Image (cartoon, coloured by chain):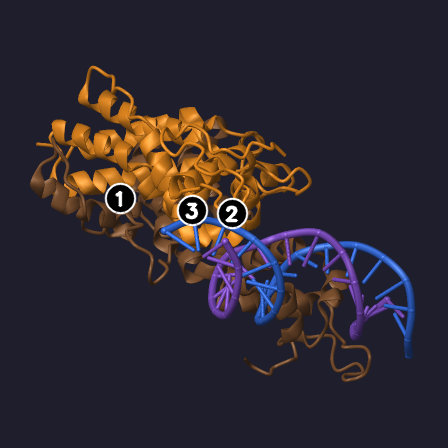
Chain colours: A orange, B brown, C blue, D purple
Amino acid sequence: MSPDISAGDSSAAADTDRGTRHAGIDRDDVVETARRLVETEGPDALTMRKLANELGVTPTTLYWHVGKREDIVAAVIERQSRLMAVREIRGDTAAERIVNAAMHTWESALAHPRVTGLAHTTGASAMLQLPQEIALVRELDAAGLSGDDARDALRSILATIAGFLVLALRRPAPDAPARTSHEMWAGIEVAGVDETTRRAMAEPADLETLCRTSVAALVQHWLTLAR
Amino acid sequence: MSPDISAGDSSAAADTDRGTRHAGIDRDDVVETARRLVETEGPDALTMRKLANELGVTPTTLYWHVGKREDIVAAVIERQSRLMAVREIRGDTAAERIVNAAMHTWESALAHPRVTGLAHTTGASAMLQLPQEIALVRELDAAGLSGDDARDALRSILATIAGFLVLALRRPAPDAPARTSHEMWAGIEVAGVDETTRRAMAEPADLETLCRTSVAALVQHWLTLAR
DNA sequence: ACCTGAACACCGTTCAAGT
DNA sequence: ACCTGAACACCGTTCAAGT
C-alpha cells in the first residue's frame, strides 16, 4: 500500500546510489521492515514477496541479506525483544513485587500482540521476553528463592501467563462458530451441573484480573519455599 | 506411503461401485482419514492434495463432501474430542479429585500431541477438551464452588495447563538454536543473579510434576472461596 | 558484493464440465 | 448426486547470471 521504500529511522546507510542496480538495502533494513510489517498487518502478511516488495527489491535479495523466512522471523523477534524496555518494578512486599514483575510480561506481550503471536507460533516466546524473565528472577532471588526453587517458580508463573496470553491474543475469525470455552457452554445441556454455574460458564472471564489472581496464588505458594 | 485407500472401520458404506467414476467416499471417510493423517504425520501434512491422494480422489471432491480446509480441521477436532474418553476421577479429598480431573486434560492432550497441536494453532482447544472440562466443573461443583467462582477457578486451572502444554508439545526443529528458556539461560551472563540460580535456570524443568504442583496450588487458592 | 529472472515444487480454492 | 480437469492466485526456495 504505502510507496514508502526507504527503511525508516536507522541512522547510517543514507542514500548510497538509490535507483541504480544496487538498492542500498542492508540486513537491518530488512529486519526492521519485516518487524513493522508483522506489527501492522500480522504474521501472515510476512511473506518473502510482500516484504521484498515493501523494500523495492526481489525476494532473492532477502536471502542474500538475512536468509530464509525462519531466519527473518528469528531476527524480528530478537529485535523486538530489545525494543521492549523493562519497566520499573513496584510493590511493598516481596510477593507484590514478584507479581508486578510477572505482569510486566503480560503487558508487554499485549502491547505488541502480533509480534507476540508470531513468537508464539514459532516457539520463540522465551527469546522475546527474556529481559522480563531476568527481571523476574532477580525479584525471586531478592525474596529468598534461589536455585531449583527459583527455576520452578519462574517456569510455573510464566507458563500460567503464557496460557492466559493464548486466550487473550486469540482473534476470532469473524465467521467461525463457537471456538472459545464460554461460547461452547452457551450451547449445551449438562447433567450434574448447577444451572447458575452453567450460565456463569457461558460468560467470558476478565482475563487480566484472573491472570493476576492466579499468579498471586502461585507466588504465595512458591514463597513458602523461600529462605 | 501406505496404499490403503479404504477408510477403515466405519460400519456402513460398503463397496458401492468401487473403481468406477464414483469413489464411494463419504464425509466420515474424509474426516477420519484426515484425523489419521494428522495423528501420524502432523498438522502440516494435512493438505488438500495429500488428503485427496490418500482417499484416491481429487482435491475438489473434498470440497463437495466436507468443505474448505478450515471445515475439515474443525471436523477432525470434533471427532477426536469424541474419541477421547473421560477417565475415572480418583482422590479422597475434594482438592485431590479436582487436581486429578484437571490432569486428565493434560494426559489426554499428551496422548494425541499432533491433534492437540492442530487444535491449539486453530484456537479450537476448547472444543477438543470440552468433555474433560465438564468433568472438571462437576468436581468443582461437588467441592462447593459454583457460579462465577467455579468459572474463574476453571479458567484459571485450564489456562495454566494450556501454558504448560505449549511447552511440553513444542517439538524443536532439529537445527534451530536456543529457543527454550533454559537454553537461553545457558548462554548468558546476568548481574544481580546468584550463579547457582543461573545454573538452575539453564536446566529443563520436569513439566508434568511442575504442572501438577501449580494446579494444586491454584486449587488450594480457589477452594478458599468454596461453600 | 549485491541484486535480478526464471524456474521448481508446492499451496488453497473455484468453476465449468462430465457421468 | 458425485466427481474430474483445468485454472487462478498465491507460497518458499534455489540457481545461474548479470553488474
Q: Chain of mark 1?
A: B
Which amino acid type corresponds to the residue marked 1 in the rendered image? Thr
The circle on residue A21 is: 2
- Residue at image position (14%, 35%) is A225
Gap in angstroms between the C-alphas marked 2 and 3: 27 Å
Q: Chain of mark 3?
A: A
Q: Chain of mark 2?
A: A
Packing grade of label 3 (10 A; few <14, some 14-19, many >=20) is many
Gap in angstroms between the C-alphas marked 1 and 3: 34 Å
Image side of residue B30 versus residue A137, left or right? right
Q: Is residue B195 above or below residue C10?
A: above
Packing grade of label 2 (10 A; few <14, some 14-19, many >=20) is few
The quarter of the displayed image where residue A96 is located: top left
The circle on residue A73 is: 3
Which amino acid type corresponds to the residue marked 2 in the rendered image? Arg
Packing grade of label 1 (10 A; few <14, some 14-19, many >=20) is some
Mark 2 or mark 3: whose residue is earlier in sequence: 2
The quarter of the displayed image where residue B80 is located: bottom right
What residue would you read off at disc 1? Answer: B213
Give the structural element (helix, strand or loop) at label 2.
loop
Q: Position of residue B143 (x, y in %)?
A: 40, 36
Q: Position of residue A154 (x, y in %)?
A: 24, 38
- Residue at image position (76%, 83%) is B18
Q: Is residue B209 above or below residue C18?
A: above
- Residue at image position (65%, 68%) is B49
Image side of residue A58 versus residue A175, left or right? left
Which amino acid type corresponds to the residue marked 3 in the rendered image? Val
The quarter of the rendered structure image containing the C terminus of chain A is top left
Give the structural element (helix, strand or loop) at label 1.
helix
Mark 2 vs mark 3, foreground winner is 2
